[in-house]
Image: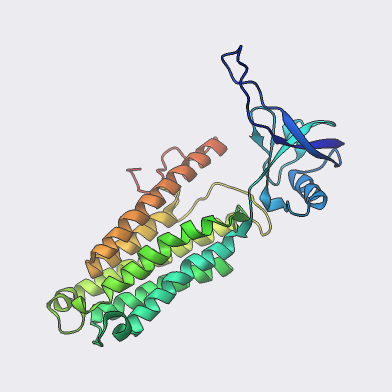
Amino acid sequence: MQLKIAKRSGKGKDKRASEPAPSSPRVLFTVEVSDEASVDDLKSTIARKDKTMYPDRQRLTVGESKEVLEAGTSLTKYSIADGDVVYMKDLGPQIGWQTVFYIEYFGPIVFHYLIYNFPSLVYGHAFEHSEVQRRVYLLIMGHFVKRELETAFVHRFSHGTMPLLNVFKNSFHYHLLSGLNLAYWVYGPASAQGTALAAKLGNPTLMAVLTGIFLFAELSNLSTHVTLRNLRPPGTRVRRIPYGYGFDMVSCPNYLFETIAWASITLLTRSMASVLFLVVSTAQMYIWAIKKHKQYRREFPDYPKSRKAIFPLIA
């Protein structure tokens, strides 16, 4: 069948009417696909017609309702027939989600390594790090190395790409708040070896308990990521209801355990920089969790009604 690929023109307004006039299509070209073609087949056909519009850069919709054609589905799902118009939006240059994750987590690794290991360059003089500073450095570096390894070997992404410019916005959160700002204040001379603050923070029992909580949260976070990975066969965007450890009470236990891990870092350091990152990151994860929770409930009628989004029994 032949399909018209078009862009939506702006909605005009009829001076004699109180409602905007419906948008009219600006046909770019026509393509031919089989009657059994999928959305992915159509995107590939468009990409062959226009080399700049690779599949991940396309957003295809139909009708005045602007229903989005979802990847991995058949065109028949949308009752598309010969001669119909499919609207295409250019999402702009894209970057792979895996690459985005590598960039996001690499920044904090660099900042923490440099600020911890070269204090004379950062603070103007050398000093000996306290036991709590050494412990926190190992835990934070371990966290971000874990995230890089998960990106390489665990995560399977439901969306292949994101707009290129968004990588700068996403990286700001990690590079500045959990990287530069956190490292500068946590590894500074105020809590160095021999200071009153170092003595206060260096209680062995408290450090052991908080380190144990952090490791528990990190391993639990990894477990939930593996569960999510196993729900999606390689090379697909299949979505299923997750069950098992962490998922019995909340939809996003990975965010819950991440919050617990950073809360333990905040208690270890008692730094306002750590408090700032904990508040901002928890707020962001809460927003993501609510969105995913609503999507689960919308997509799966049998989704467990007792589950909360991120915090058990609360929200």
The front one of 37 and 162 is 162
Where does the image place residue 117, in percent across and percent down from the top left?
Answer: 35, 84
Q: What residue lies at 23% left-to-right and 66% top-to-bottom?
A: 271
> Considering only vertical position in the picture, is 119 above or below 101?
below
Residue at horizontal 52%, vertical 67%? 103
In terms of depth relative to the viewer, which is nearer, 295 or 276?
A: 276
Asked whether residue 173 is in view, the answer is yes
Q: x and y percent of residue 191 in the render?
A: 20, 77
Residue 29, quarter of picture: top right
Question: Which picture quadrant has residue 132?
Answer: bottom left
Q: Please name the colour scheme applied to the rendered image.
A: rainbow
Q: Residue furthest left?
A: 196
Whole-percent x, y for residue 181 in the image: 32, 67
Q: Farthest residue to the front: give it.
A: 15
Camera-nearest residue between 94 and 282: 94
In the image, taking residue 122 as reference, residue 235 lies left or right, namely right
Q: Residue at x 81, y 48 (%)?
A: 45
Measured from the top left, where is residue 52 in percent x and y? 74, 54
Q: How many numbered marks appear?
A: 0
Q: Quadrant of the N terminus?
A: top right
Name of the residue lying farthest toward the top: 16
Q: Split into 4 quadrants, where in the image is the C terminus?
A: top left
